[in-house]
Image: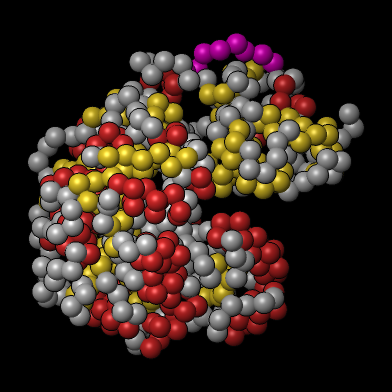
């Protein structure tokens, strides 16, 4: 067994790995940014090394600094967790070249599976079914249209070196091809440093089912269960469960065996997940991608099979054979996981909401597990993703698990920041979810999710002259509608007031009132609805813009948020530059309304 492991991550997954290391008698080394100096993973680890400033590029993405931290502390191995550098082949290679053990697959496997084109080619060699797709990357809008004419619409344009929905655009008809192609390439370049894209036939009502695989250095490879991850928003998973409900034994086995063939074809080692789009009524499945790391949703597999997948990772990395000797173990009962993020779900906007947490108190009932990255008094930083923790329940049946989850969500206490718990409550109570009638587009296309959640004030339904409004407040455009978010001010969040009174942050309706007509709405001043980083600026000073036109894009907690003009007019000034971190309520640009 290993004696010391450096955990190259933060938040919930770093805490998870550090705790398993402690149970296995393995010393742990945390790394952290200046913003995370007091973070839970730093407090729990045996040692901790400061990497640099809050920006991920200066800390959690700084390969040389992480390698040096491992060497200076005498760590034998590096565990990347998920996110950041977990699927970065260059990082895995750097760890290997430094004489350290990378707790994951060989860098060669990460590189192949990290390219969607190469992964598709390998899947074809392993006889894994696939959705029709382009032969390699595409070069022009004409390629999109030709593919659509041959295979039908909708068509998905996808980043070759990407994931999580970034660099992905859906094209419903030939008329949308040009704008979607340009947008996909632009976002891919910004997110992954490369603008290569390819095409796939878009399955609009398929489920997202993934298979957990594990392989060791002795030639063994097995599949150990599946998970359904169909409830998604912006291609980000919200709720996962195991086993995937509503699948026949034959379909389940076929996916598992295909996953093992793929793992063997690429020379895989360690924990991995093969993701599929599934049409259960047709007994059909199609290869989507392979994630060469531990998944966020791995606890539901652990709870139904009685495993510790992180402990298994440590053992395999140390050269030990798999403790799981056969594929397809029958799961015991049913497990469901809810991701709890620091986001405000009002109006189904899911606005990132970093800040100090007053209280974290998890349920203590039987069959409930809380995997968290924060404790009471910690702060959710705006520089990283918004995951606070994961609430996982187990019960003998799916119905019992859903009933238990309903109670557990009511008992979970997180005060100080708004979270996605209200959204989770509505999802698991919905008849479609209860009846396994969900798919990857269900939440955003098939139901009016916004109507199930508390609203934000919608200015489009008010009289601009006579309506009184609450201050402080700020505007944000979503789609073609303008909304007011009531807890932002020019100085920052209105609730940056004491965490001892967390409810005031979410429910406050006080503040001076005034007649509409002045302020940001009338002047066309665009303010930031959140703390974030300016990812791109789409206009220049002097440019003519229309109401609703994108001025710039803010990135906060791994989400891109377009900032749009509130009025028709001319861009008088830009107050920020690309890469700048701005506070909630900060002035971003001023548009002088036409005619003024």
On-image quarter of the C terminus: top right
Q: Nearer the viewer, residue 418 or 53?
A: 53
Q: Is residue 393 visible?
A: no
Residue found at x 66% / y 67%: 181
Q: Is residue 495 visible?
A: yes
Asked if residue 526 lies in the magenta stretch, the reply is: no
**Which quarter of the picture shows residue 405?**
top left
Residue found at x 12% / y 37%: 365
Report the magenta residues as a range: 508-515
Compared to residue 167, the image places residue 128 above or below, namely below
Residue found at x 42% / y 56%: 85
Q: How is the image coloured?
A: secondary structure
Compared to residue 187, the image places residue 358 above or below, namely above
Q: Position of residue 545 (x, y in %)?
A: 80, 44
On-image quarter of the N terminus: bottom left
Taking the image as shown, residue 403 lies to the left or right of residue 186, namely left
Q: Position of residue 445 (x, y in %)?
A: 48, 56
């Amino acid at each position: 067994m290993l004696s010391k492991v450096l955990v190259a991550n933060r938040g919930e997954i770093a805490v998870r790995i550090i705790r398993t290391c402690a149970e296995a008698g393995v010393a742990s080394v945390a790394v952290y940014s200046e913003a995370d100096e007091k973070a839970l993973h730093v407090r729990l680890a045996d040692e901790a090394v400061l990497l640099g400033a809050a920006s991920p590029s200066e800390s959690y993405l700084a390969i040389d600094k992480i390698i040096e931290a491992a060497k200076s502390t005498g760590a034998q191995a590096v565990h990347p967790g998920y996110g950041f550098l977990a699927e970065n082949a260059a990082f895995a290679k750097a760890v290997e070249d430094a004489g350290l053990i990378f707790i994951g697959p060989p860098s060669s496997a990460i590189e192949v599976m990290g390219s969607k084109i190469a992964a598709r080619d390998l899947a074809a060699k392993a006889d894994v079914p696939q959705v029709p797709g382009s032969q390699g990357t595409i070069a022009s809008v004409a390629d999109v249209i030709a593919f659509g004419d041959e295979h039908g619409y909708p068509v998905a344009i996808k980043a070759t070196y990407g994931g999580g929905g970034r660099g992905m655009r859906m094209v419903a008809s030939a008329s949308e091809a040009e704008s979607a192609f340009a947008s996909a390439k632009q976002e891919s370049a910004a997110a992954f440093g490369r603008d290569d894209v390819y095409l796939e036939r878009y399955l609009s009502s398929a489920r997202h089912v993934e298979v957990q695989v594990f392989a060791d250095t002795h030639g063994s490879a097995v599949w150990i269960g599946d998970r359904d991850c169909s409830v998604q928003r912006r291609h980000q998973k919200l709720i996962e469960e195991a086993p995937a409900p509503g699948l026949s034994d034959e379909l389940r086995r076929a996916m598992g065996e295909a996953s093992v063939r793929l793992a063997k074809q690429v020379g895989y080692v360690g924990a991995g997940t093969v993701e599929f789009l599934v049409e259960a009524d047709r007994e059909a499945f199609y290869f989507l991608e392979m994630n060469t790391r531990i998944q966020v949703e791995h606890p539901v597999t652990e709870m139904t099979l009685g495993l510790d997948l992180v402990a298994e990772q440590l053992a395999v990395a140390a050269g030990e054979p798999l403790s799981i000797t056969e594929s397809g173990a029958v799961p015991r009962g049913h497990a469901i996981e809810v991701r709890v993020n620091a986001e405000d779900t009002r109006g189904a906007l899911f606005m990132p909401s970093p800040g100090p947490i007053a209280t974290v108190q998890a349920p203590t009932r039987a069959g409930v597990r809380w995997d968290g990255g924060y404790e009471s008094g910690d702060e959710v930083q705006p520089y990283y993703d918004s995951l606070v923790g994961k609430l996982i329940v187990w019960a003998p049946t799916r119905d019992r698990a859903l009933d238990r989850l309903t109670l557990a969500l009511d008992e979970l206490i997180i005060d100080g920041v708004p979270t996605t718990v209200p959204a989770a409550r509505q999802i698991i109570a919905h008849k479609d979810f209860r009846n396994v009638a969900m798919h990857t587009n269900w939440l955003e296309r098939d139901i009016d999710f916004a109507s199930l959640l508390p609203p934000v004030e919608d200015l489009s339904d008010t009289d601009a002259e006579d309506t009184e409004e609450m201050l402080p407040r700020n505007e944000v455009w979503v789609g073609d509608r303008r909304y007011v978010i009531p807890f932002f001010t020019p100085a920052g969040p209105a609730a940056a007031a004491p965490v001892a009174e967390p409810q005031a942050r979410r429910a406050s309706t006080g503040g001076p009132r005034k007649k509409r007509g002045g302020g940001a709405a009338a002047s066309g001043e665009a303010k930031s609805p959140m703390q974030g980083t300016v990812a791109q600026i789409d206009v220049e000073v002097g440019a003519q813009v229309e109401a609703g036109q994108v001025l710039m894009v803010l990135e906060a907690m791994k989400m891109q948020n377009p900032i749009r003009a509130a009025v028709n007019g001319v861009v008088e000034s830009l107050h920020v530059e690309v890469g700048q971190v701005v506070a909630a309520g900060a002035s971003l640009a001023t548009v002088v309304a036409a005619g003024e």
